[in-house]
Image (cartoon, rainbow, N blue to C red):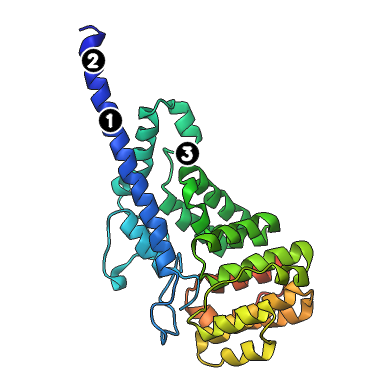
Amino acid sequence: FDIWFWWPIIRILKVMMATTALSNTVRVCAYFSDCREHRRPRSKGNTLRTFANTPRGHHEQLGAQRSSLRFTGKLTNEENEPAIGASTSTSKRTLLGNGLALGVLAMGTSVGDAAQAGLFGPSPGDLVQSGMQRFRKGDVEGSLEDFDKILILAPSQKPYLWQRGLSLYYANRFEDGAKQFRDDVAVNPNDTEESIWAYLCEAQLKGAEAAQQSMLRVGRDSRPVMRAAYELFQGSGTLQQLSDAGKANASDLFYSLLYIGLWHEAHGNVEEARQAIVEAARTPYAKRSGDYMASLALVHCKERGWLNPVIG
């Protein structure tokens, strides 16, 4: 057969591959959208987080687990959800990467270029899980490797990678961290914690007072402890008010101590920061909740060279 026989068939195959890529790109967007949705607390009285991966811990885990399951097309009841890092169906897990790769090839990209971009590797959902697991273990640079790969696979999702911003802070990449958090608030203007973390990054660059002057304004947070934390960093609240807000329950106690410690760090009060964050890491909530931010408190202690708060 000559080329005119094969030409229509090739065209049809290209359209089919491009359609598959588009479908899976939509699934990427849905994944990160779910991550954002589940980072908000679902019930005011929920004190012991059942979260374990993307966000009452405030940056949570179960939300990301559920998002990841939706992303792969497999959703079960909460009590039956797998632990972080648990394996999922290989065919479904790799569907996104393969679909994107086929779409790129259909548009004329070579196999070598697609492989270099990581399109045949883990999906964005896998990389979020992996990056968070590596951060929990204290591998800050390793977590950034995973989060940065997502920027290649799905660059439009960068504003939703709050986990990357936290890793950037502990990698001392404060300018990049501030931009990550500012991009986050740009798409979610009610995100209290991202506003605070942008401040924390900028305080390391230009000082606490200058960072306060340019602090991002966000909507009123429904959580009293986070309202008190935001007001403290903004300059309209006090350390005592945040400490009092932490008396409501175990979760609020942890978060009040954590953000008191971070405020002291931004102001150069090393000993006060150490006392508060070590105490936060020693709380029952930090030890039992599985909250991502509880892991962050431990990472903070490790990065600052403080005595292990769990055994010390």
Sequence order check: which comes first, mark 1 or mark 3?
1
Residue depicted at x 40% and y 69%: 62
- The residue where tag 3 is placed is 118
- Camera-side mark, 1 or 3: 1
Amino acid at circle 2? Trp
Relative to 53, is 230 above or below? Answer: below
The disc, 3 or 2, on the residue closer to the chain's N-terminal end is 2
Contact between labelled residues 3 and 1, with CB atoms less than 8 Å apart = no
Does residue 88 appear to the left or right of 178 in the view shown?
left
Q: Nearer the viewer, mark 1 or mark 2?
A: 1
Distance between mark 3 and mark 2 Cα atoms = 30 Å
Looking at the figure, which quarter contains the N terminus?
top left
Comparing 179 with 127, the one in front is 179
Disc nearer the start of the sequence (1/2):
2
The answer to the question of whether label 1 and label 2 lie on touching residues, with beta carbons closer than 8 A, is no
The residue tagged 1 is 15
Looking at the image, is 203 positioned above or below residue 254?
above
Residue closest to the eye, 188 or 142: 188
Residue assigned mark 2: 6
Q: Quadrant of residue 138?
A: bottom right
**Tag on residue 187?**
none
Specify whether residue 254 is in view. Answer: no
Q: Quadrant of the C terminus?
A: bottom right
User: Could you say where residue 76 lies in the image, as x and y percent from the top left?
Assistant: 26, 65
Q: Is residue 235 visible?
A: yes
Q: CA distance from mark 1 to mark 2?
A: 15 Å
Residue at 60 percent of width and 93 percent of height: 244
Q: In the shown orientation, is residue 152 left or right of residue 280?
A: left
Q: What amino acid is labelled 1 in the image?
A: Val
Q: Residue at x 38, y 28 (%)?
A: 107
Q: Amino acid at mark 3?
A: Gly
| Crowd tier of the residue under label 3, counting other residues whose Cα lies within 10 Å: few below 14, some 14–19, many 20 or above | some
